[in-house]
Structures are given as C-alpha cells and as structure tokens.
Image (tube, grey):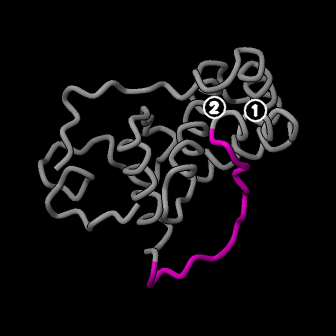
Amino acid sequence: MTDTTNRRVIDARSLISDDTRATLVANMRDKFPQLTEEKADRGVGQMLAFLAACAYSKRPLSPSPLVDDFWHAFLLHTKAYREFCAETFGRFLDHQPGYLDPEEHGGGRALRAGTVDCITLAGYEIDMEFWPELDLAHCSQCHANCSDSPNHPAIHS
C-alpha cells in the first residue's frame, strides 16, 4: 500500500516556462472558447502530468480525450515540445494513437484509471475534471480499487 499522507504533490505546470504555458492556454482557448483561462491552465497541468507519467512508465498509458487535446496543442509547437522532452525526460515522447488490445491492457476506462494511478504515484496532482469518464471524484469508500487498495490489480510499471 502506498502512503500518500506525507508526500509532496507536484504541480506539473512548473515543468514548463510561464511563456510556453501562456501560449498553450491561449491556443486551447482559441480552439475551445468555452474554456476559462483558469481551466485551460489546469488542463495544461494535467497534460504535463500525463507526459511525466508516460516518460517513466513501462506500460502503456492513455490520456482522456480532453487531456489529449492539450497534448495536441503542445505538439503543434514542435520546437518547444522537442526541447521540453529533451530537457525534462532526456528523450522525445512520441504521440502514437492506436489500438491497444483490451484483453492485455483493459478497455479505455481501465487504461485511463491505470494512467491516473501512475500520475498519482509519480507524485503529480490529479484534477478529476480532466478525467471525467472515471468518475472517481465522488469516491468515499475505502478499498474501492484505487491505487492504494488491496483490491487494485498489480501495477507493472
């Protein structure tokens, strides 16, 4: 069981410069006018937390559709994205959409639940508004198959 009571939670938005973050926020607000600046900024953070988990996980991870939209916005700034990957992870993180066998990796929801677990275990903040299909924000019971639960399948990361 993972003890999260004394762990420092990392805000992934600190992984990029304020200028790059402002550019991504503006890009997402242009594409999705209903996004507030505050929500777009939080979305950038969730995308960066996802990328950080991907850089260290040995198993496939999957963004939510909204987090994927933020990743696409970053990918369009290829030079900034390439430099971010090199400086932060020491390698380029490819975006490779494709089919993952549900028998091997679980369905989309299971894969994203594992992704959220990996992000959390890596120490990054999770904003459940960006992972709506998981509906875990209202969980109030112990051992509900979250990363600390003895009912949770073993993570091989």
Tell me where residue 128 appears, x and y as whole percent. 43, 39
The secondary structure type at the circle numbered 2 is helix
- Residue farthest to the front, as pictured: 90
Q: Residue 28: which disc?
A: 1
**Could you tell me how far apart the alpha carbons at marks 1 and 2 are, in whole angstroms?**
9 Å
Please report the residue visible at 44 percent of the width from the left and 84 percent of the height from the top: 103
Q: Which mark is residue 44?
A: 2
Q: Amino acid at mark 2?
A: Val
- Residue drawn at 76 percent across, 28 percent down: 24
Is residue 43 found left or right of 4 in the rendered image? right
Q: Tell me whether the residue at label 1 lies in contact with that at label 2, contact meaning CB atoms closer than 8 angstroms.
A: yes
Q: Position of residue 127 (x, y in %)?
A: 45, 34
Q: Earlier in the sequence, mark 1 or mark 2?
A: 1
Q: Quadrant of the C terminus?
A: bottom left
**Which segment is the magenta one?**
89-104
Q: Residue at x 17, y 42 (%)?
A: 140
Mark 1 element type: helix
At which x and y percent is residue 47?
60, 40
Which of 7 and 111 lies nearest the eye of the viewer? 7
Q: Is residue 110 above or below residue 40?
A: below
Image position of 26 (left or right of 120): right
The residue positioned 76% from the left and 46% from the top of the image is: 72
Residue in the foreground of this view, choosing between 105 and 15: 15
Q: Is residue 140 left or right of residue 16?
A: left
